[in-house]
C-alpha cells in the first residue's frame, strides 16, 4: 500500500512538472570572424522579452514556454539577423552577424512622385494600422523607412522596410518596433480587398499614471477578446463555443455558384456551424502544438467565416469597415472571412501560429490590424475575463428518437 502511495505521488508530481514545463534559450553573438559582439540587442519577436549580449557576446532567456518563436539580433553596423524555431527543450544558438554595407536610402528609388507616394501611404496606413478607434491613436514615427511598390496592371500594393518601424500605440499603451518583411494589398480577388502582411514585432510598455494604466488595461482586454490569438487559443483548448466563437466552413463564391447550379441541396449543409473541435481539419502534434490542415480547405474550395458572438461590430466599423455578408441565418457578432494561402498552420498553446502569412483576412480582424496587436504572452486578468458560454449539448440517439416520435 505504501509503495502504491509513493507511485501515485511520483506520477502526480511528474504531471505537475510537465504542465509547468519551461525552457531556456541561450547563445552567443559574434561577427563573421567569430569575435564576440557585446551590447547586441536580442529579443523574442511578438513579445516584451529583450536582453543584450554581455562582454563575451552571450545572452540568455529563461522561463520560456513551449511554442513557435523567432529570435531577432540587432547591432549598429551589422545586418539584422532573424531565426525562427520550435521550442520543445533547452536550446543554444551561435548567431554570426554580417556587416551592413548598404548605406543608400532607397525610399524613392523607383521614381515614384511625392504625391503618388502620399496617396499610397494613406492606403498602406489604413490596411496596416487599421481603421478602428484605436488606429486613430497610432502613429508611425519614421515613415521614411517604408518602401512602397504599386502594380497598376494587377492593382496590387506591396510594401516592406529595411529597418524597424517605430509605432506608438497610445490606445493600448505600447511602443512597438515592427520590421516589415512583406505587405500585400490585393484588390483584384473577388473584390474583397484581401490584406496580408508579415514581419517581426517587439513590444515596449509605455509609462503612464495610474489612471492611464487602468484605461490601457481595459483597452487591452477589449482588444484581446474576440481577436485572432483568442480564437487560436480557444481552438487549441477546444473551447470555441464556450468562449463565444462560431465557425462556418463555407464555399468560396465560385464554388458556391457551381454548387447551386449542380445541386442546390448541397448548400444546406453549410447553413449550420461546424462543431467547436473542427476535428476534420485539426490534428494534435503533441501536448503543446496542433496542426490546422489549410490544404484540405483549399482542396474543398472553401473559406472560413468566424463570428465572435459576445461583442457587436462597433459603429465606426459599420461605417468604414469591410463588412462580411452572411448568406444564411448566422448569429450577430463580429464576423471575419479567412482564406487559406498555405497548406497548414502550426498552432501553439498560447495562440501563436506558424507561418503567420498562411492566411488572408477580410472583415473585422482585418479592420483592427496592428493597432489591436498584443504581446504573444498577454493574459487577460482573471477578474476581467467574461463568463463562459454554456455549450450546447450534442444530440444523442435517444433525443433524436424522442424528437422523431
Image (tube, grey):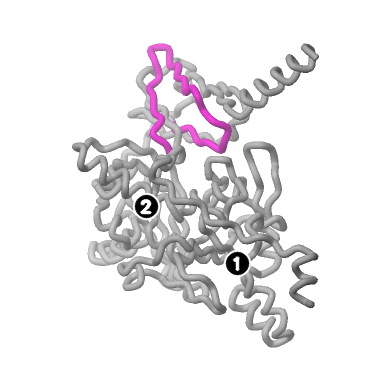
Reply above or below: 14 against 129.
above
Q: Position of residue 19 (x, y in %)?
A: 61, 29
Cα distance, mark 2 to mark 1? 24 Å
Q: Which quadrant would residue 217 be assigned to in this image?
A: top left
Q: Please name the residue that numbered disc 1 is placed on.
A: 248
Q: Which quadrant would residue 75 be assigned to in this image?
A: top left
Q: Indicate yes or no whether the magenta region holds residue 386.
A: no
Label 1 residue SS: strand
Residue stretch in magenta: 46-72
* 147 on left or right of 347: left
Q: Indicate yes or no whether the magenta region holds residue 51.
A: yes
Q: Please name the residue that numbered disc 2 is placed on.
A: 222
Q: Position of residue 141 (x, y in %)?
A: 24, 46
Q: Position of residue 52 (x, y in %)?
A: 38, 22
Reply above or below: 56 against 111.
above
Seen from the viewer's position, the closer of residues 366 and 102 is: 366
Q: Position of residue 272 (x, y in %)?
A: 63, 71
Number of marks? 2
Seen from the viewer's position, the closer of residues 255 and 316 is: 316
* 366 on left or right of 340: left
Reply above or below: 331 against 171.
below
Label 2 residue SS: helix
Reply above or below: 376 against 185.
above
* Crowd around label 2: few <14 · some 14–19 · many ≥20 (10 Å): some
Going from the N terminus, do you reach mark 2 or mark 1 first? Answer: 2
Amino acid at each position: 500500500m505504501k509503495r502504491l502511495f509513493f507511485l501515485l505521488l511520483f506520477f502526480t508530481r511528474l504531471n505537475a512538472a510537465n504542465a509547468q514545463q519551461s525552457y531556456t534559450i541561450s547563445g552567443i553573438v559574434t561577427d563573421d570572424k567569430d569575435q564576440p559582439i557585446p551590447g547586441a540587442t536580442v529579443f523574442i519577436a511578438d513579445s516584451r522579452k529583450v536582453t543584450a549580449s554581455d562582454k563575451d557576446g552571450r545572452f540568455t532567456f529563461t522561463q520560456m514556454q513551449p511554442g513557435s518563436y523567432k529570435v531577432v539580433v540587432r547591432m549598429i553596423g551589422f545586418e539584422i539577423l532573424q531565426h525562427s524555431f520550435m521550442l520543445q527543450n533547452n536550446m543554444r544558438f551561435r548567431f554570426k552577424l554580417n556587416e551592413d554595407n548598404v548605406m543608400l536610402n532607397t525610399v524613392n528609388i523607383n521614381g515614384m512622385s511625392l504625391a503618388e507616394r502620399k496617396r499610397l501611404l494613406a492606403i498602406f496606413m489604413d490596411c496596416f494600422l487599421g481603421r478602428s478607434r484605436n488606429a486613430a491613436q497610432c502613429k508611425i514615427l519614421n515613415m521614411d523607412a517604408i518602401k512602397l511598390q504599386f502594380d497598376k496592371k494587377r492593382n496590387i500594393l506591396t510594401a516592406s522596410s529595411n529597418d524597424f518601424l517605430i509605432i506608438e500605440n497610445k490606445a493600448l499603451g505600447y511602443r512597438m518596433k515592427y520590421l516589415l518583411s512583406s505587405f500585400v494589398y490585393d484588390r483584384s480577388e473577388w473584390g474583397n480587398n484581401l490584406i496580408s502582411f508579415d514581419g517581426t514585432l517587439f513590444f515596449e510598455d509605455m509609462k503612464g499614471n495610474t489612471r492611464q494604466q487602468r484605461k490601457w488595461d481595459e483597452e487591452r482586454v477589449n482588444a484581446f477578446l474576440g481577436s485572432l490569438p483568442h480564437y487560436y487559443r480557444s481552438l487549441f483548448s477546444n473551447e470555441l463555443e464556450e468562449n463565444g466563437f462560431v465557425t462556418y466552413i463555407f464555399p468560396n463564391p465560385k464554388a458556391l455558384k457551381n454548387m447551386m447550379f449542380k445541386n442546390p441541396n448541397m448548400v444546406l449543409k453549410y447553413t449550420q456551424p461546424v462543431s467547436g473541435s473542427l476535428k476534420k481539419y485539426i490534428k494534435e502534434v503533441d501536448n503543446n502544438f496542433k496542426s490546422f490542415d489549410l490544404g484540405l480547405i483549399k482542396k474543398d474550395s472553401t473559406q472560413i467565416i468566424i463570428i465572435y458572438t459576445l461583442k457587436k461590430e462597433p459603429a465606426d466599423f459599420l461605417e468604414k469597415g469591410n463588412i462580411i455578408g452572411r448568406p444564411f441565418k448566422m448569429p450577430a457578432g463580429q464576423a471575419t472571412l479567412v482564406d487559406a494561402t498555405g497548406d497548414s498552420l502550426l498552432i501553439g498553446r498560447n495562440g501563436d501560429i506558424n507561418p503567420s502569412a498562411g492566411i488572408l483576412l477580410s472583415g473585422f480582424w482585418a479592420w483592427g490590424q496592428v493597432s489591436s496587436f498584443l504581446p504573444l504572452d498577454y493574459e487577460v486578468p482573471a477578474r476581467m475575463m467574461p463568463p463562459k458560454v454554456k455549450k450546447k449539448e450534442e444530440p444523442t440517439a435517444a433525443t433524436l428518437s424522442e424528437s422523431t416520435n
